Image (cartoon, rainbow, N blue to C red):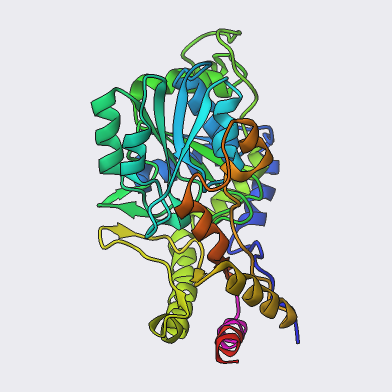
Amino acid sequence: MNPIPFNRPTIVGNELAHIQEAISRGNISGDGHFTRECCALLERRFGIHKVLLTTSCTSALELIAWLYELGPGQEVIMPSYTFVSTANAFLRTGAIPRFVDIDPETLNLDPAAVADAVNENTAAICAVHYAGVGADMDALLALGARHKLRVLEDAAQGVHAWYRGRALGSIAPLAAYSFHATKNYTCGEGGALCINDDELALRAEILREKGTNRTQFIRGEVDKYTWVDVGSSYVPSELTSAFLFGQLERMDEIDERRREIYDTYTTGLEPLAAAGHLRLPVVPTDRVVNHHMFYVLTRDAGTRNALMDHLREEQIQATFHYLPLHTSPMGQQLGYRDGQFPVTEDLSARLLRLPFFHELLESDQQRVIKAVRRFFRD
């Protein structure tokens, strides 16, 4: 019996041929042909004003912290149920994460909790689109407008997902994508800054290019480039962009395959959900999910852990997801404590992610479903 991994990055098309072409073109350092192609494709497909590829989603979030000029004494409201990069990006500029609880249905920011957390130090709201299900952006943008707060989207898991007809990443003035190896479209390590406010575009280019106006120089807008602002090196290799373009040009094919996997899990596990053994993901009717992952919520933490052990014995790699940031050692240093956000802690302890990747065989997926069914039957 072969082990079933949790994730396996996949070559779906011309990734290697594009890398060879990038080498043949003679520019592998960045912002060449394939970087431009990736950005143009994302802008066109998702209605984003300007896309800049970055070395990671973390890099894109750090750029947002700079562009929004978030610093000491300011707070950024965000879910505790998220990856550490969401908090680290703002801590690096001196701002403080203000964690709040999540909506028990979508596992996204609870707008009511956000409203309760707003105070005189609040500067921004960071929406995290968990599992490719859009957060309630209308409510969050309304809160931002009412209190004159910046709003951003951590859309690391949200590429090719939609909220009320708008692509995630195209809604707030600034957003961040991830192309990490665990994401739907990948280049191993990579990300993108999505800019929907034209006034922020030029400075974003400068910050991304080490604080220089090199991008303007490349476009022929200046006759030489020099140091004009703070910045860092956030430009990905052209080889990385070439690989990514091979994935993005097959976006619909990848999405369709992931939908098939998602629907198979849903159909196979619905009887257990109907019997009350577990809960399946919830997608509101005004949102379109990108099938980033498939998780189940068990009745309690003990059942989740026992199910995870059972699947491991069956050589099936299933895993929990985020540990709430407010319960981490760093969260404790920031003054948070266990029990502060009960919905987050409860759902985190009961959530189990099942194997999910492009080349997951139908037979292996049925093996996973049967193993889960066997656990609850026994």
Q: Whole-percent x and y of residue 350? A: 54, 65
User: Is residue 260 in the magenta section?
Assistant: no
* Total tally of numbered discs in the picture: 0
Q: Whole-percent x and y of residue 257? A: 48, 71
The answer to whether residue 123 is seen in the rendering is: yes
Give the answer, above or below, for where 178 lies relative to 358: above
Figure quadrant of the N terminus:
bottom right
User: Is residue 362 in the magenta section?
Assistant: yes
**Closer to the camera in the image, 241 or 266:** 266
| Magenta highlight: main SS | helix
**Closer to the camera in the image, 75 or 293:** 75
The answer to which image quadrant residue 106 occupies is: bottom left
Give the answer, above or below, for where 362 lies relative to 103: below
The answer to whether residue 31 is seen in the rendering is: no
At a point 38% along the width and 33% down the height, the residue shown is 117
Figure quadrant of the C terminus:
bottom right
The answer to which image quadrant residue 263 occupies is: bottom left
**Closer to the camera in the image, 298 or 313:** 298
Give the answer, above or below, for where 73 lies relative to 26: above
- Residue stretch rendered in magenta on the structure: 360-370
Q: In the displayed structure, does residue 236 sit left or right of residue 104?
A: right
At a point 57% along the width and 20% down the height, the residue shown is 93
At a point 57% along the width and 61% down the height, the residue shown is 349
Q: Whole-percent x and y of residue 213? A: 54, 14
